[in-house]
Image: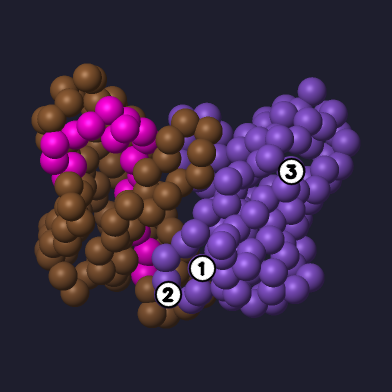
Amino acid sequence: GENVEQHPSTLSVQEGDSAVIKCTYSDSASNYFPWYKQELGKRPQLIIDIRSNVGEKKDQRIAVTLNKTAKHFSLHITETQPEDSAVYFCSASIMGYGGSQGNLIFGKGTKLSVKP
Amino acid sequence: DAMVIQNPRYQVTQFGKPVTLSCSQTLNHNVMYWYQQKSSQAPKLLFHYYDKDFNNEADTPDNFQSRRPNTSFCFLDIRSPGLGDAAMYLCATSNRDDEQYFGPGTRLTVT
């Protein structure tokens, strides 16, 4: 089955710097890669996702890149702000086939701290 | 607003005393999921329903059961909670092949 590795487990940056979180996946059939942000005690919230037919997607200060050949994808946050502090989870699934293949497989998470 | 609602938000139960957590949705999604999330860990899928079809993860303990009486509601039953079952329980919904929306979660404490 699919396995998702996420690095680093913790990341501390100064406000205004960029943050990069990297994930690798094992199943080449995976074609949907959402990223979730989870603040302490709150629900995971989707912040950006990418499907395997594109290599990059950007939404304001957040971007995600996907390298299908290497089977890795990354989250980039520019001009970080203290409110970006949270745990970020990458995930992967296989869309288009239904059933359990559509279930999300999560990485273990990255705790991002943005220092003012 | 369309949303995923979980009740209660906080639940305290005694060791071995059955407990039921509920989830409802106004999104009319056909898939509903139950996750268990322990501190500093990723959400772990327990089971999901695609419409009325129940799908159990292989490593979900028999102590955990689920019911989906209709499209809008899904319940998680823990028959005999142990101390190790203390966690945040997250419900999520999606349409097939689309993003998942998470509810706010129920924090379960076992005394």
How would you rate the neighbour count of disc 1 (Cα within 10 Å): few for under 14, some for 14-19, many for 20 or more? some
Q: Position of residue A8 (x, y in %)?
A: 24, 32
Q: What subunit carries mark 3?
A: B
Residue A70 located within the stretch drawn in magenta: no
Q: Which residue is mark 3?
A: B8
- Helix, strand or loop at label 3? It is loop
Type of amino acid under label 3: Pro
Q: Residues within 10 Å of mark 2 (few under 14, many from 20)?
A: some
- The residue wearing badge 2 is B97
Label at residue B94: 1
Furthest-top residue in this view: A116
The boundaries of the magenta stretch are A76-94
Q: Earlier in the sequence, mark 3 or mark 2?
A: 3
The residues bearing labels 2 and 1 have C-alpha atoms spaced at a distance of: 8 Å
Mark yes or no: residue B51 visible.
yes
Please give the name of the residue rendered at 37% of the width and 64% of the height, measured from the top-left corner. Answer: A93
Q: Are marks 3 and 2 on the same chain?
A: yes
- Which chain is displayed in purple in the rendered image? B
In the rendered view, would you say A53 is above or below B48? below
Classify mark 3: residues with Cα within 10 Å, few (<14), some (14-19) or many (20+). some
> Looking at the image, which is closer to me, A8 or B32?
B32
Which chain hosts label 1?
B
Q: CA distance from mark 3 to mark 1?
A: 21 Å
Residue at the image point whose x is 43% and y is 59% from the top: A104
Q: Nearer the viewer, residue A65 or A107?
A: A65
Residue A29: quadrant of the picture: bottom left
Residue type for callout 2: Asp
* Tag 1 secondary structure: strand
Residue A44 to residue B86: above or below = below
Q: Position of residue B30 (x, y in %)?
A: 59, 75
